[in-house]
Image (tube, rainbow, N blue to C red):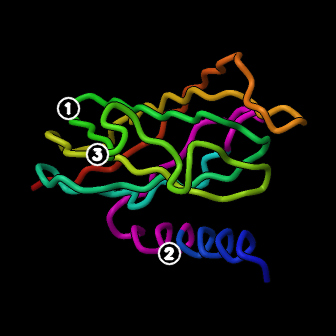
C-alpha cells in the first residue's frame, strides 16, 4: 500500500473513531456541500471541544483537483481562532501549501470557545489551480464551508 493510500486509510479510520467516539456527547463537526474544483473536507477532529479550553483542531482534506497556495481562515461566534506560528494569520496544509488530486492532508486551527452549544464554524478557503506544466495559476478561487462545532460547557 503506498503512502497516500495509507494516509487516506488513517484519515478514514480517524473519521470513524470521531463519529463513534462522540455518540454520547453530540455529532462530530459536519461539512456543508463541497465544491468539486477544490479540496474536499473529510472531517474536523475533534468535532467536540470544551468551553474555555484552548485546543488544536485538525481538518482533514482530500484533493479533488491539484491546488496551490492554499490558505484557510476560520471564524465563529464566541470563538477565538488562532493559526500555526509559521503562518500566523491563516493555516495551510501540513506538508506544504499544495495538494494533489487524491492526496490527503490536514490543516490545524487553534480554537477557544467562550460559549457552549452547537456553533457554526465558517471555513474560508483561498487557492489557485496547478497547470499541466506544474506552475501555479494566478486566478485565486474562494470557497466557504460551514461546519457545526459542538462545544461542551465548562
Question: Which residue does the numbered mark 2 point to in the structure image?
Answer: 17
Q: Quadrant of residue 132?
A: top right
The secondary element bearing badge 2 is classed as helix
Q: Check if residue 33 falls in the magenta segment.
A: yes
Camera-side residue of 137 and 153: 137
Answer left or right for 79 relative to 148.
left
As measured in the structure, the alpha-carbon distance from the residue carrying label 1 to the one carrying label 3 is 22 Å
> What residue is at 54 percent from the left and 30 percent from the top?
125
> What residue is at 60 percent from the left and 75 percent from the top?
10
Residue at the far top: name it: 139
The secondary element bearing badge 1 is classed as loop
Camera-side residue of 32 and 38: 38
Q: Which badge, 1 or 2, comes first in the chain's sequence?
A: 2
Answer left or right for 34 relative to 84.
right
Q: Is residue 18 above or below residue 71?
A: below
Question: Which residue does the numbered mark 1 point to in the structure image?
Answer: 78
Q: Which badge, 3 or 2, comes first in the chain's sequence?
A: 2
Labels 1 and 3 touching (C-beta < 8 A): no
The magenta segment is 15-39
From the viewer's perspective, is the residue at label 3 or at label 2 nearer?
3
Q: In this figure, what is the number of numbered marks?
A: 3
Q: Which mark is residue 85?
A: 3
Give the class, few, some or many, for how many residues have Cα within 10 Å of label 2's Cα (few <14, many ≥20): few
Residue 17 lies, in percent from the top left, at 50, 75
Give the class, few, some or many, for how many residues have Cα within 10 Å of label 3's Cα (few <14, many ≥20): few
Tell me the chief SS of the magenta region.
loop
> What residue is at 82 percent from the left and 38 percent from the top?
134
Q: Check if residue 11 falls in the magenta segment.
A: no
Amino acid at each position: 500500500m503506498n503512502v497516500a493510500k495509507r494516509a487516506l486509510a488513517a484519515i478514514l479510520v480517524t473519521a470513524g473513531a470521531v463519529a463513534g467516539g462522540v455518540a454520547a456527547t453530540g455529532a462530530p463537526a459536519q461539512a456543508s456541500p463541497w465544491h468539486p474544483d477544490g479540496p474536499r473536507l473529510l472531517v474536523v477532529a475533534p468535532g467536540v471541544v470544551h468551553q474555555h479550553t484552548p485546543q488544536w483542531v485538525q481538518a482533514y482534506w482530500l484533493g479533488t483537483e491539484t491546488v496551490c497556495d492554499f490558505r484557510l481562515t476560520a471564524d465563529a461566534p464566541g470563538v477565538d481562532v488562532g493559526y500555526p506560528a509559521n503562518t500566523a494569520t491563516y493555516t495551510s496544509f501540513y506538508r506544504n501549501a499544495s495538494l494533489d488530486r487524491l492526496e490527503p492532508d490536514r490543516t490545524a486551527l487553534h480554537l477557544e470557545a467562550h460559549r457552549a452549544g452547537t456553533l457554526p464554524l465558517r471555513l474560508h478557503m483561498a487557492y489557485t489551480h496547478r497547470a499541466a506544466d506544474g506552475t501555479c495559476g494566478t486566478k485565486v478561487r474562494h470557497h466557504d464551508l460551514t461546519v457545526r462545532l459542538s462545544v461542551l460547557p465548562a
